Image (cartoon, rainbow, N blue to C red):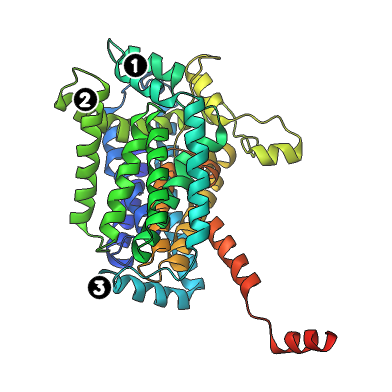
Amino acid sequence: MVIASYAVVMLAMIGAAAYLIFRCDRFVSASTMLISFLLLVYGPAYLLYMLWRIPISAVDKQISQSVHFPEITVALNLSIALMFVAVIAGIELVTRLMPAAVNSTREGLKNWSHQPLARAPSGEMWLLAIAFLMAAFMLWVSYREHHLQILLGYLSVPGDEFAKIVYRQQNGGSRVYLFNLLTGTIAPMIIVWAGLVAWGRRSWILGAVTALLLAATILGKLQTLNKAPIVLFILQLLLVGYLLFRNNLDWRVCLLGVAAAFLIFIPIFMIAIPGMQPSDAFEFFYYRAFDFSNAALMEYWGAIPWRLDHMWGGNLRVLSAIVGWKWQPSYDLVSDTWRSTGAGTHTTAMFIADAWTDFSYYGVGVYALLVGVLCRWIDLTFLKGKTALAIAILAASFLGIYNLMISALPTSLVTGGMGLPVLVAVIRAASLHWTRPRRDGDTSRQAALR
């Protein structure tokens, strides 16, 4: 059964790769980024982890020596295979439900590389106001919480990596939720959107405010004292720079993207951990990007249902509140299972981990289907041409899809960036509704009343 499950998951990965190459349009879009990320982190790297690199930690060793390890392996392999199938099914479902949008999106993407950036018709003033208010609030919080001093203190901490970890746990991050939300997801999208509008309209005022917001965002990301936020922001900006000139997705672009991540992460590791050699930084990057993510999955599948029962909605805060259950986050339960209660650590994994925790294979299939639907809807709603909004949405989707690789679907929607395109679409629809010209009948009736 174990060998058969490996055959199934390998076939699913090969099918997803074939779908990406032969069925998807070879452009950067939310759908293609989703499948590419899944194949990158949970494709061959997953098989390498399962067949060769495990165990990489004490928890890994405990799971791999369990009498249930064959059943755990089968369940995890089948869940990964189901995820790939359901994601593709979600993409295909939206494609067939929106044929007109498919044609217009395909034309917009085909002409992308030959078009100049479309001039924003309006919206400069409200973008200016939003960017200024966000920058002022973020800088005020940074000043109140002494973020610059904390950052300088981290760089001057003597000793090994452990000393820096202790300093980061004690001082890193803000206590203000709104600040973290703005810094993590909303501000980067507004920076791209406002910056491109300022460039297209030659507005130095909007450009200056965008630069102020950029400075506040960089400081906010650095003061977390984590390496990933600032690196992901740099990768977002590199993606924006690429999309300003071209929009093609092939093996060269994917290879350049991975190489860029290596070239950015490795120097940051060496700065953050004095004495680390480039080879050690390379190995640490691979561990954090691939082994760590797959090991987190192993912790969930190793715990459920062999040590913990499926929660059937108890992991969902809103559903728990409606039904009257006590909310128990899976990241605490799983961590406590393998470590110790009150250890202060969490175990977070990709979006299907919480789906498995709550609803077993049903949750994996439904969550993956919804993710495929959402990403394809983003493409067909926003990618009609090279506009500032389209590029900003793709940058936000990049971060949101990354967060799907390491966190639950609700978290990715609310704080990870995946919900921003939905929010923008709702606001845009509402603004169009209120600014739509009145019909002749309405105008005549109002004239008669006057």
Q: Quadrant of residue 242?
A: bottom left
Q: CA distance from mark 3 to mark 1?
A: 48 Å
Q: Nearer the viewer, residue 22 or 268?
A: 268
State which tag comes first along the sequence, 3 or 1.
3
Q: Dot 1: within a 10 Å radius of its alpha carbon, few (fewer than 14), some, or many (20 or more) residues?
A: many
**Residue at image x 41%, y 30%?**
296
Does residue 200 appear in the picture of this structure?
yes
Mark 2 lies on a secondary structure that is helix
**Residue at image x 31%, y 30%?**
288
Q: Where is mark 3, residue-wise? A: 114
Q: Quadrant of the N terminus?
A: top left
Mark 1 lies on a secondary structure that is helix
Q: Nearer the viewer, residue 344 or 437?
A: 437
Q: Quadrant of the C terminus?
A: bottom right
**Residue at image x 45%, y 26%?**
68
Does residue 412 appear in the picture of this structure?
no
Whether residue 120 is situated above or below residue 152 in the rendered picture: below
State which tag comes first along the sequence, 3 or 2.
3
Q: Where is mark 1, residue-wise? A: 164
**Is 300 displayed left or right of 239 in the figure?**
right
The image's mark for residue 270 is 2
Residue 39 coordinates in the image, percent (x, y)? 32, 48
Whether residue 65 is situated above or below residue 118 in the rendered picture: above
CB under 8 Å between discs 3 and 1: no
